Image (tube, rainbow, N blue to C red):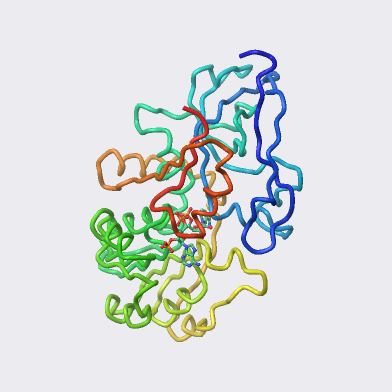
Amino acid sequence: MSETQINHQIRLAARPVGPVKPSDWEMTEEPVAQPQPGQVLVQVVYLSLDPAMRGWLNDARSYVPPVGIGEVMRALGAGRVIASASENVPVGAYVSGLLGVQEYATLDGAALTVLDTNLAPLPTYLGALGMTGLTAYFGLLDIGRPKEGETVLVSGAAGAVGGVAGQIAKLQGARAVGIAGGAEKCRYVTEELGFDAAIDYKSANVMAALSEHCPQGVDVYFDNVGGEILDAALAHLARHARVVICGAISQYNATGAMRGPANYLSLLVNHASMTGFVVFDYAARYAEGVKALSEWVAAGKIATREEVITGGIERFHETLMRLFDGANTGKLVLQVAD
Ligand SMILES: NC(=O)c1ccc[n+]([C@@H]2O[C@H](COP(=O)([O-])OP(=O)(O)OC[C@H]3O[C@@H](n4cnc5c(N)ncnc54)[C@H](OP(=O)(O)O)[C@@H]3O)[C@@H](O)[C@H]2O)c1
């Protein structure tokens, strides 16, 4: 690579209010930074699009600091090492890590995970074999703790985390009921992911559909969306139910107060619990999760799906918005290079 190679980047230009606008971003360019001792230079090939990105833009206390104005947008990604000053990560290795929305990332080799592309294609390491799969694995098994014969309800069921969570529930011998937007997503959830039933929240009466599909009540509710759907699920809890607060995408673009769970006293009468978690809490156990997920994927017990959008970082904004429009099925990924 020549010294004058240019790195295009997407930086935060303004803090969004409500949905992110194109003018909240700025595209910049600078020379590619060559690696210093211990560092590697990665050509970014795929970027992970995550609903959490919207939260990272708010100037509020959270589990990570907000992205600063003028900073390169934070993003998980996967790419190939094209120059290395690290003993542990050679040129040619495929890696994943916090690469940012840019074409090249220069960062410590120790901050990267080396990937085996013989086991799975690169985008899968951003989906079922990456942070997405680990979120489903630890959230469902550690907090939801489904038992054989129990009913596990998953919202955002056709999405990246929800699709994996429901399939893991089935592997535990539970019944999995999904909630997703639209007939085609519901078909995908039942026919391709193997859920026992799916509720189209855009056309069905969710309260009535929950009574129909969860007649014994919901033992585990894995919530990705919050808002009205969380309230409907709370109204259908079984005794000793566990509610897993994974996310609340319906509230991320709220300009006023977020809608909270009005039916929370259902936790009291059902001796139930509601617990939030962040996947990073489980960093010390990632190897366990990756091993289990890899075995399930290799054995065909978990179906994976990534929706890869091409066109490079110029398409970052419109691709991010797909998450909030419900345009993605499975893990949403942006391809940055061939
Ligand atoms: N706790 C953690 O550590 C952690 C880690 C990763 C992700 N998460 C959370 O997990 C959730 C799922 O993330 P993901 O990456 O798997 O995204 P995803 O589900 O693949 O994509 C987002 C989906 O959310 C649904 N959605 C969008 N707006 C909605 C609304 N107003 N009401 C109901 N559904 C809506 C859409 O599906 P429909 O077409 O079905 O509406 C959309 O396709 C998010 O809340 C995310 O923040 C948490």
Task: Between residue 16 and residue 175, name the one nearer to us.
Answer: 16
Can you say whether 230 is above or below 286 in the image?
below
Give the residue displayed 35% in from the left and 46% down from the top. 305
Give the residue displayed 48% in from the left and 80% down from the top. 267
Displayed quadrant of residue 321: bottom right
Displayed quadrant of residue 117: top left
Does residue 103 appear left or right of residue 48 in this picture? right
Can you say whether 171 is above or below 287 in the image?
below
Can you say whether 221 is above or below 131 in the image?
below
Can you say whether 150 is above or below 50 in the image?
below
Q: Residue furthest top?
A: 2
Q: Point out residue 316 in the picture as x, y percentages from the top left corner.
A: 57, 44
Does residue 252 appear left or right of residue 287 in this picture? right
Q: Point out residue 22 in the picture as x, y percentages from the top left corner.
A: 64, 51
Task: Between residue 222 and residue 202, name the one nearer to us.
Answer: 202
Does residue 137 appear left or right of residue 337 in this picture? left
Task: Between residue 130 and residue 336, name the one nearer to us.
Answer: 336
Displayed quadrant of residue 204: bottom left
Q: Point out residue 149 in the picture as x, y percentages from the top left corner.
A: 25, 68
Quadrant containing the N terminus is top right
Q: Point out residue 45 in the picture as x, y percentages from the top left corner.
A: 50, 31
Number of numbered discs: 0
Task: Between residue 89 and residue 157, name the one nearer to us.
Answer: 157
